[in-house]
Image (cartoon, helix red, strand yellow):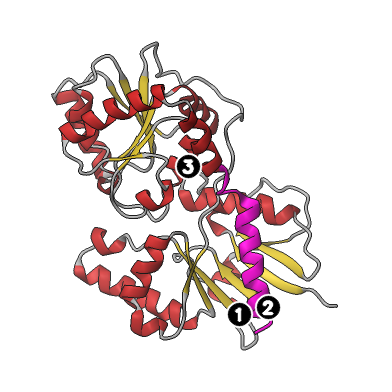
């Protein structure tokens, strides 16, 4: 039997510190090593990506010719755009198109003109798609509500993001870490992450440090840095980007992971923190209560006192109940790549047989 060709667009490999970049890299590793009887996998990667490993997949480098002429791209049976921002694809009459949507953050982040542009572009993609998936139930509901007319009879299938198991990986203590106990958070330093709300919270925890890690070139990063200096908040450090080894060390040694974000499609860092059995505290916004599923403390609101009281309460509960750690790790393990990829292979077969 001739194998069907399944292409995954992994051009985000060029940005390994972003969420899309991490997903692309783990897809690259996993789909390159699996062997499926009825499918050949084609991985579309950036031309400049050099971390090539031997495997079962066929590797195609995206070049300038492909950018301007889609006929330079391979002909496949299924084309999977693994996020909604990927613009170049080759969809022929016999090609099934899978579209994965990670979030609709533009609804709250953009002005009305740019929202219309995003709506128009995403609506066109949804119309073309033979299958639409979302990385959480929250995102699926958003898509179904906002694009009800476009979807028509299409159902948005929830396939939760996979999270690489990093507990036990090599670690390295960052130069900025001192001997004080600390809280930890990570992500792009944008206003939607609400990291700025933690500054006033930390004024109530002078015995702890807070390390806010991630790309801080955005306006929110500048505002946080300015407040730290002007208000002399000595126990909060805006560190910028960190290495994978430093991230593992911070998860391993943190007293708690704080994540007050209101702009998540999935919230990968909270699952990473759970792998280490750390107290995790999250906002009651977007997908976070769904993804943590009772294994984290959910702040009922994001006022300073509520957040500070929640940290104290949950740290006490954690010390008193040793079962929380194991339940949390078990929950984190459920988001593994084997389960995730098998769900997509099932979807691919369903499309191929329809």
Residue extending furthest toward the left: 231
Residue 345 belongs to magenta span: yes
* Residue position marked by numbered label 3 in the rendering: 271
Q: Is residue 226 left or right of residue 314?
A: left
Q: Is residue 233 left or right of residue 146?
A: left
Q: Nearer the viewer, mark 2 or mark 3?
A: 3
Location of residue 164 by image quarter: top right
Location of residue 72 by image quarter: bottom right
Q: Nearer the viewer, residue 255 or 93?
A: 255
User: Which region of the structure is painted magenta?
Assistant: 333-354
Q: Which label belongs to residue 96?
A: 1
Q: Nearer the viewer, mark 1 or mark 3?
A: 3
Q: CA distance from mark 1 to mark 3?
A: 32 Å
Residue 83 visible in the picture = yes
Residue at 23%, 44% (x, y): give it: 300
- Name the dominant secondary structure of the magenta segment: helix
Q: Residues within 10 Å of mark 2 (few under 14, many from 20)?
A: many
Q: Is residue 177 left or right of residue 44?
A: left
Q: Are marks 1 and 3 in contact (CB under 8 Å)?
A: no
Q: CA distance from mark 2 to mark 3?
A: 34 Å
Q: Secondary structure at mark 3?
A: helix
* Residue position marked by numbered label 2 in the rendering: 77
Q: Is residue 2 above or below residue 260?
A: below
Q: Are marks 1 and 2 in contact (CB under 8 Å)?
A: yes
Residue at 55%, 51% (x, y): give it: 162
Which is more N-terminal, label 2 or label 1?
2
Q: Secondary structure at mark 2?
A: loop
């Amino acid at each position: 039997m001739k194998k069907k060709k399944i292409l995954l667009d992994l051009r985000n490999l060029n940005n390994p510190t972003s969420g899309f970049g991490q997903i692309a890299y783990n897809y690259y590793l996993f789909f390159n090593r699996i062997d499926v009887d009825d499918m050949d996998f084609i991985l579309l990667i950036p031309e400049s990506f050099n971390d090539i490993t031997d495997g079962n997949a066929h590797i195609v480098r995206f070049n300038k010719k492909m950018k301007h002429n889609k006929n330079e791209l391979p002909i496949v049976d299924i084309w999977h755009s693994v996020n909604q921002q990927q613009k170049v694809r080759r969809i022929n009459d016999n090609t099934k198109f899978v579209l994965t949507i990670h979030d609709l953050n533009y609804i709250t982040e953009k002005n009305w003109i740019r929202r219309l542009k995003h709506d128009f572009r995403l609506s066109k993609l949804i119309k073309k798609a033979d299958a639409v998936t979302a990385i959480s139930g929250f995102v699926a509901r958003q898509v179904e509500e906002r694009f009800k007319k476009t979807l028509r009879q299409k159902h948005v299938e929830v396939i939760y993001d996979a999270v690489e198991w990093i507990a036990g990986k090599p670690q390295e203590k960052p130069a900025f870490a001192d001997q004080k106990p600390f809280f930890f958070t990570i992500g792009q330093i944008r206003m939607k992450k609400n990291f700025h709300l933690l500054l006033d919270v930390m004024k109530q925890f002078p015995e702890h440090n807070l390390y806010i890690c991630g790309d801080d070139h955005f306006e929110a990063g500048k505002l946080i840095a300015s407040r730290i200096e002007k208000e002399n908040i000595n126990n909060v450090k805006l560190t910028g980007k960190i290495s994978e080894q430093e991230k593992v060390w911070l998860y391993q040694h943190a007293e708690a992971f704080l994540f007050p974000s209101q702009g998540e499609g999935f919230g990968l860092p909270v699952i990473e923190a759970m792998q280490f059995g750390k107290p995790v505290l999250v906002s009651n916004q977007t997908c976070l209560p769904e993804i943590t599923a009772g294994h984290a403390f959910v702040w009922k609101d994001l006022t300073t006192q509520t957040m500070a009281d929640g940290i104290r309460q949950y740290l006490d509960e954690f010390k008193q109940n040793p079962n929380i750690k194991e339940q949390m790790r078990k929950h984190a393990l459920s988001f593994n790549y084997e389960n995730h990829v098998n769900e997509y292979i099932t979807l691919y077969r369903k499309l191929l047989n329809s």
